[in-house]
Amino acid sequence: MPRPLFISFEGIDGSGKSTQARMLADALKAEGHDVELTREPGGAPGAEEIRRLLVEGAPERWSPETEILLFTAARRDHLEHRIRPALDTGRTVITDRFADSTRVYQGTTRGDLRAIVDRLHDLMIGIEPDLTLIIDTDPQQALARGLARNSGEDRFEDFGAAFQEKLRAGFLELAREQPGRCRVIDGNRPAPVVAREVLALVRQSMGEAGR
Ligand code: ADP
Ligand code: TYD
């Protein structure tokens, strides 16, 4: 059996990741692929409990160091209970956020902690996606889209517009650092237009991997 593809979506809050992850999963399922659509923080019952601690409450509730530990704990639970079992049974995994979010949010934006993020990742997680799709959307537009959802999960949005600008720069820097697996996609276009580009990139990756 060919190794299934592990795909992550990344980007700032409200950039359109969840929409694109859902559209990609639907498109691949329609073509007969076995797909597991999941998200972080969360994606498994224990990790979803940790999620609530992270996305609700006052912005200064946790230090960046504590956040690194909590996000990595949630990721480990997600990996054990959802990602590994899916990949091991030949399913393509699409996750809305993964370790790059910790690298950018905690590692370079909330603090200067990238070395700690990377060490903990190596110790506790140890895998990278085959393909990372970074949805690059204007921060003002993304913030307006995100807050309009009224989700009650706005702890990170509440750090404000300058924070989202820094995050965007962090994701673009990460894409330059890891060109093998990262692709930057212009998210300022209508969702179906973005989705077509996403699908083309995924098909290309599947082709390269002989799937
Ligand atoms: P994220 O997962 O990155 O936070 P979402 O996919 O939840 O973003 O999108 C945030 C909001 O913006 C949602 O209300 C969604 O319907 C809307 N949205 C998503 N993609 C687009 C797009 N390309 N153009 C306009 N609105 C969009
Ligand atoms: P998410 O639900 O994807 O938020 P949004 O839909 O607004 O993009 O993620 C919740 C928040 O957690 C989001 O603001 C980003 C943040 N986050 C980190 O700071 N570090 C991480 O490692 C992850 C996975 C998320």
Image (tube, rainbow, N blue to C red):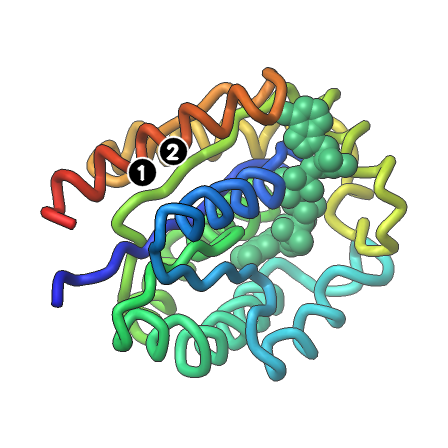
Which of 155 and 93 lies nearest the eye of the viewer? 93
Q: Which amino acid does label 2 sit on?
A: Leu
Q: Where is residue 107 in the image (x, y as percent from the top left)?
A: 48, 50
Q: Can residue 162 be seen?
A: no
Q: Number of labelled discs? A: 2
Query: Which residue in the protein does label 2 denote?
Result: 199
Q: Can residue 58 be seen?
A: yes
Q: Position of residue 133 (x, y in %)?
A: 41, 37
Q: What residue type is labelled 1?
A: Val
Q: Residues within 10 Å of mark 2 (few under 14, many from 20)?
A: some
In the displayed structure, 50 sits above or below 114; it is below
The dot on residue 99 is none
In the displayed structure, 180 sits above or below 137; it is below
Q: Residue at x 51, y 52 (%)?
A: 97
Q: Which residue is drawn at 48% across and 74% down?
A: 78
Q: Circle 1 — which element?
A: helix
Query: Which residue in the protein does label 1 denote?
Result: 202
Which of 101 and 83 lies nearest the eye of the viewer? 83
Q: Where is residue 26 in the image (x, y as percent from the top left)?
A: 50, 47
Q: In this view, does 157 lie to the left or right of 96?
A: right
In the displayed structure, 162 sits above or below 110; it is above
Residue furthest top in the image: 189
**Cα–Cα span, label 1 and label 2:** 5 Å
Which of 34 and 39 lies nearest the eye of the viewer? 34
Q: Position of residue 110 (x, y in %)?
A: 61, 47
Q: In this view, does 53 lie to the left or right of 84?
A: right
Ligand 1 within 8 Å of the CB at mark 2: no
Q: In this view, does 189 lie to the left or right of 62?
A: left
Q: Quadrant of residue 196?
A: top left
Contact between labelled residues 2 and 1, with CB atoms less than 8 Å apart: yes
Q: Which residue is drawn at 31% across and 53% down?
A: 129
